[in-house]
Image (cartoon, grey):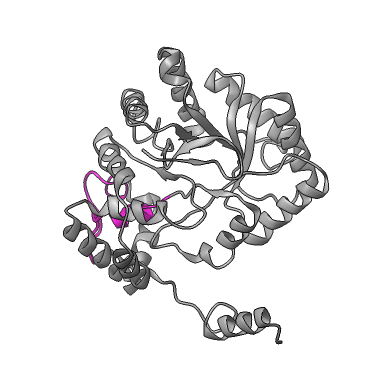
């Protein structure tokens, strides 16, 4: 397992992170603990959760794992959690206000059985709360020792840039990470969000790097999933989105390209898709989301896989998102080049 610094911090984390959204839902406690054991054994150290994962159960499962394992196993873990979404039905039970974030973090620490977490993330932007209030709250958490770093998830480019520069202007602790959706089937963040993160020195922690399972090769064209898959067991959770993805020609162009590279390499499609994401610019650690230890085992093998320039070019070409001429297409590129050259 390779390690990279967590954004512009001095904290080293594994290039693959263990996502725990399945804990308490698709993975029971025994399987969840087995995943944590295997991940740490393989050299992984970044574990990512959130208060809303299984309504707090994911954090509780992680907390019991910490309590049941010796210190020499747990001391290297860099633990990340998130707050923002509602955990109760009260008027102030959600958002990025000082009131909610303070209570949300305290509740997460109670479920985890810990005094602090390494990375605390705002799970999404809050248009109703002044950004300065949120940043001051996070700065206070850092100063109190309850968190060591903070970051954001699902922020757009302008939201991220505004937060970074406001933190600087107020002389507050700066964010270090952004957790966006990123995969060969979701590359639109490359237009604005990745450049914004690079400009600020933030590390990306991509979620859903397998595109909701599409890049693992488990789905077939025009065949609705059945059996032991997330949609097969619970078709109500996203079949409409499945049908939309299934109808898009880009989906199958990307799946075919990933399959071709995997077959030539003698590896799994999932490993190829994960390797592509992990070696993208600004990426610090790619978040795995396995239901079983077997799936995790296959995913972990991506830690040692680095694609060639030719393989990357093949995947880039197949997955390039469609853009109009302006501001991201040919006309936009020409305009940016003129601006750089000093012309208007």
Total labels: the figure holds 0
Residue 213 covered by magenta stretch: yes
Look at 52% across and 62% down and name the residue there. 189
Instruction: Reply above or below: 32 against 244.
Output: above
The answer to whether 336 appears left or right of 305 in the picture is right
Magenta segment boundaries in residue numbering: 208-233
User: Measured from the top left, where is residue 57 in percent x and y?
Assistant: 47, 27
Look at 46% across and 44% down and name the residue there. 285
Look at 32% across and 51% down and name the residue there. 235
* Quadrant housing residue 14: top left
- Which quarter shows the C terminus? bottom right
* Quadrant housing residue 133: top right
The answer to whether 161 appears left or right of 295 in the picture is right
Specify the farthest residue to the right.
170
Q: Nearer the viewer, residue 270 or 244?
A: 270
User: Measured from the top left, where is residue 331 in percent x and y?
Assistant: 57, 86
Specify the farthest residue to the front.
341
* Residue 317 shows up from this direction: yes
User: Measured from the top left, where is residue 40 in percent x and y?
Assistant: 37, 28
* Residue 84 shows up from this direction: no
Instruction: Reply above or below: 307 against 147.
Output: below
- Dominant SS in magenta: loop
- Which quarter shows the N terminus? top left
The answer to whether 218 appears left or right of 273 in the picture is left
Instruction: Reply above or below: 254 against 323.
Output: above
Q: Nearer the viewer, residue 120 or 72?
A: 72
Residue 277 covered by magenta stretch: no
User: Measured from the top left, where is residue 296 in percent x and y?
Assistant: 30, 38
Look at 47% across and 50% down and name the residue there. 206
């Amino acid at each position: 397992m390779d390690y990279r610094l967590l954004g512009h911090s001095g904290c080293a984390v594994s290039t693959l992170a263990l996502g725990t959204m399945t804990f308490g839902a698709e993975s029971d406690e025994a399987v969840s603990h087995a995943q944590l054991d295997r991940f740490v054994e393989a050299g992984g150290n970044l574990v990512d959760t959130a208060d809303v994962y299984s309504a707090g159960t994911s954090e509780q499962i992680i907390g019991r794992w910490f309590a049941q394992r010796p210190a020499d196993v747990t001391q290297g873990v860099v633990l990340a959690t998130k707050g923002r979404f509602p955990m109760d039905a009260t008027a102030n039970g959600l958002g990025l206000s000082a009131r909610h974030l303070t209570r949300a973090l305290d509740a997460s620490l109670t479920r985890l059985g810990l005094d602090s977490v390494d990375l605390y993330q705002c799970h999404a932007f809050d248009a109703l709360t002044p950004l300065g209030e949120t940043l001051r709250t996070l700065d206070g958490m850092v100063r109190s020792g309850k968190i060591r770093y903070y970051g954001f998830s699902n922020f757009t480019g302008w939201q991220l840039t505004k937060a970074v520069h406001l933190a600087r202007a107020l002389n507050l602790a700066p964010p270090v990470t952004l957790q966006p959706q990123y995969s060969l089937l979701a590359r639109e963040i490359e237009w604005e969000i990745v450049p914004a993160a690079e400009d600020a020195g933030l590390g990306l922690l991509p979620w859903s790097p397998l595109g909701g399972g599409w890049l693992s090769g488990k789905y077939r064209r025009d065949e609705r999933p059945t059996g032991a898959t997330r949609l097969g067991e619970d078709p109500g959770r996203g079949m409409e989105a499945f049908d939309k993805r299934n109808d898009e020609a880009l989906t199958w162009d990307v799946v075919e390209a990933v399959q071709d590279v995997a077959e030539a390499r003698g590896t799994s499609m999932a490993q190829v898709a994960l390797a592509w994401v992990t070696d993208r610019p600004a990426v610090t650690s790619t978040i795995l989301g396995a239901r079983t230890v077997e799936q995790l085992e296959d995913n972990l093998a991506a830690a040692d896989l680095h694609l060639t320039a030719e393989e990357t070019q093949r995947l880039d070409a197949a997955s390039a998102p469609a853009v109009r001429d302006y501001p991201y297409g040919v006309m936009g590129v020409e305009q940016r080049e003129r601006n750089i050259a000093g012309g208007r």
